[in-house]
Amino acid sequence: MRMRILALCGALMLMISACNSSSEQTAASSTSEAPVSIPSQATGEEATTTTAPVSEFRRTVDEITTSMLVLQPELVTDLGVGELIGFDANYLLDDLSARGRQGLADTAIEGLSALTTLEGSDLSPADELSAEILRWYLEDQVTMAAFTQYENPVNYITGAHTNFAEFMADVHPIQSEQDAEDYVDRLIAFPTQIEDLVDRLRESEDSGIVPAETSLAIARWQIQNAIGTGDGASHPLVTDFQERVEALPDENPTWAAGVGARAAAVVEDLIVPALEDLDDAVRKLDGRSNAKAGMAYVPGGDEYYAAVLRHFITIDMTPEEVHQVGLDQVDRIVAELTAELDTLGYDASGNFALAMRQVASDAGSMPTTTAAERDLVLQRTIATIEKAGEVLAEQFTVRPVTELDVVRPRPGREGGSGAYYRSPPIDGSRNGIYYLSLGGPEFPILTMDTTTYHEGIPGHHFQLGVQRSLDELPLHQRVFDFTGYAEGWGLYAERLVYESGLYDDDPLGNSGRLRMELLRAVRMVADTGIHWNGWSRNEAVDYMLDLGFDRGMAESEVDRYIVWPGQAPAYMVGMLEILRLRDRAAAELGDTFDVAGFHDALLRQGSVPVGLLEDVVDQWIESVR
């Protein structure tokens, strides 16, 4: 019987160097169109590895990080960090029960205790900052564990019922027979996750905490999509698996047929019935009305929302402060958009909402009903990313090691998401993935390029791709992500592209950029409005309609805020702090300020809570004075 933890010795862990060499992406696209890889070229030097003596500080913080990672086996696989930490995770799934969540918190408490042993040590400023980053992560784990019953375990963005198929296809490796056997083990473990979701739903209901009606309806659609026809042999979890097994070099046909048959049996006999039980539990759940969709109407909801808002924005701001900043930013961007649209001949001064809708209509869309049409969208996306890489080359001296694949999301995921990114693993065994939803009949052009900059270059692929490759950093700065910084960087990337002149000959595209920036400001207002001020779903939708967003988008966005409290404000909060710190650094350094140095200073620290970014910039300023 294989050992779950092969070794947890921090010293040994530090002696193993993470492999950053790029290898061919093994995950297949969700359609017949093949994924498209975009080299990370013309963007500066790759992050380089270093070798340094193992300090007591590094041993301690990496041991703490390892203790948290072994409780998150899916993250270990996603990060490609199993060999580095000596943990065979590829046949295990996360414990989604309330007990599992508390286990993470208990381990975090032990980690905080271990961190205190470093107090009073002669730490460098870099180590002090690193310790504070880890402390923030651990304290947040403890805080959020107290609110497990408030979390919505069955939602269309983060729910296991919709993410499992994508994880198994695009993350779980199939490079050997053992990988395939591990795949089947994970299939066998999946019904336990579903049972845990059902238990948590019932526990939350017993506490008077239930999702809103619309949220439950969307969840049921996704669950039924995951069930499919109920036939194991034709289920995507099996058909995709069989294709990957048959592609193995020197594949044994008898073994391949056997492992495929076992996978089909598990899906049909275990997974489909478990999903049917989940569907039944959701159907029987008496959800809150959409008039009371937010946490403001839940017992203890105010305390939870304040905590989850801080969890996502990663800086100390009250819901009232976030709401007001959002209102101020909406006013600023509406003024900028009004001037822009008036210049283009739209009467935004007279009727802003109508002008917004007109410019979106005039920008047009690209059809996506055939494979050839979808390929044209992908080719435009590739050209956009490559152009950004060329124009922004001088503003960065560090770049991701891996390439960027552009693919469609998995069936069942595509209908609930527009575009999103999955970072490459530490071992370089998989490229970064930009998921571009092409499930509808057309793809709108107005905001297309801006979204690509956010998800690809210089956005998430730059920030997260670089973060994973920085093996000179303590492990936690490479593997743990903070939403406020990650999404703040993505929105900052959109602004940076504008500042670099890429919209100079594309005034409609710049209107789309401002429209997306307005959306992020609206998110601050609507999210706090729903969950803190007690807005109904209709009130939030109407607020967006008044600002020129079409009804379909407004309803989709508001439903997202309802099921994912606190996440939506993170974008604007993070970007504003990055811009503030850039302006401060430029003022203090004067002629010696170098924007490439500023960008590298941020990227080379990995992911950092927004509240600690000022420390990062302070250290950089001191280093270049």
Image (tube, grey):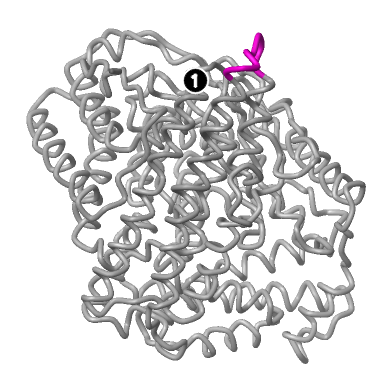
* Residue drawn at the location 73% of the way across and 34% of the way down: 389
Pick out the residue farthest to the right.
372
The relative height of residue 259 versus residue 20 in the rendered view (above or below) is: below
* Percent of width and height locating residue 591: 56, 36
Q: Nearer the viewer, residue 196 or 467?
A: 196
Based on the picture, tell me whether residue 251 belongs to the magenta stretch.
Answer: yes
Is 294 situated left or right of 330 in this image? left
| Left or right of 76, for residue 559 | right
At 33% from the left and 38% from the top, the residue drawn is: 72
Give how far across and how far down residue 154 sits, in percent.
42, 63
Q: Which residues are magenta?
A: 248-255
Name the residue beneath numbered marker 1.
427
Q: Is residue 126 left or right of residue 393?
A: left
Q: Nearer the viewer, residue 369 or 497?
A: 369
Q: Nearer the viewer, residue 17 or 238?
A: 238
Main SS, magenta residues: loop
Observer able to see residue 467: yes
**Vertical relation: 492 (above or below) 46:** below
Give the residue at x 81% y 72%.
Answer: 360
Task: Indicate the position of residue 479 as horizontal and vertical percent values.
Answer: 39, 33
Please state if 407 lies on the left or on the right of 186 as rendered.
Answer: right
Of residue 357 and residue 17, the one placed in the foreground of this image is 17
